[in-house]
Image: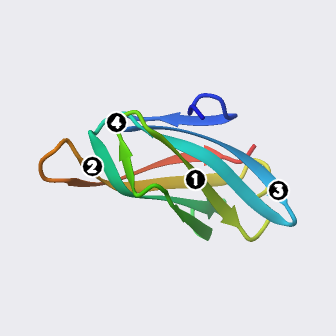
Amino acid sequence: MQPDILSLQHSDFDVKMSWDMNTIDGKTVIDGVIQNIRYAMMEDIEIWVALLDSNGKTVKRAVDLVMPLRLDMNEVATFRVIFPLVVPHGAKLLFSYKYDGSDGGDSTKWRQSFESYAP
């Protein structure tokens, strides 16, 4: 699955991500993909999503540990983040991802965040 075929998207210098959000049995499920576009390899990728209130305070957070543990350049992996509640339309979400990236030498620990809104 390529990161440009799902409805919501984000691109940065290191990754491309896309995802869909659905409500299933009173829970919000974010199914997505992440693609490594920067490093020879990324390892130990985590994707965190926080639901924020109108003041920017965290209401709820959820996380997924991306498998496989290693993602080589241009490889794509899926992720799934589940909130145990219905995220309302227009709610602000803070996505954060972290990983260890390497071009063959010492690895770089990196964390990046961006905001999105629930469709």
Residue designated by label 3: 23
Q: Nearer the viewer, residue 74 or 13?
A: 74
Disc on res. 79:
1
Frontmost of labels 4 and 2 is 4
Amino acid beneath label 1: Phe
Amino acid beneath label 3: Thr
First of labels 4, 1 by sequence position = 4
In the rendering, at what x and y percent does residue 1 appear?
60, 35
Determine the secondary structure under disc 4.
loop
Classed neighbour count for the residue bearing mark 3: other residues with Cα under 10 Å, few (<14), some (14–19), many (≥20): some
Determine the secondary structure under disc 1.
strand
Q: CA distance from mark 3 to mark 1?
A: 16 Å
First of labels 3, 1 by sequence position = 3
Q: Is residue 24 above or below residue 118?
A: below
Q: Is residue 6 above or below residue 114?
A: above
Mark 2–mark 3 CB contact (< 8 Å): no
Q: CA distance from mark 2 to mark 3?
A: 33 Å
Residue designated by label 4: 73
At a point 59% along the width and 28% down the height, the residue shown is: 4
In the rendering, at what x and y percent does residue 14 appear?
36, 38
**Can residue 55 be seen in the rendering of this structure?**
no
Q: CA distance from mark 4 to mark 2?
A: 10 Å
Mark 4–mark 2 CB contact (< 8 Å): no
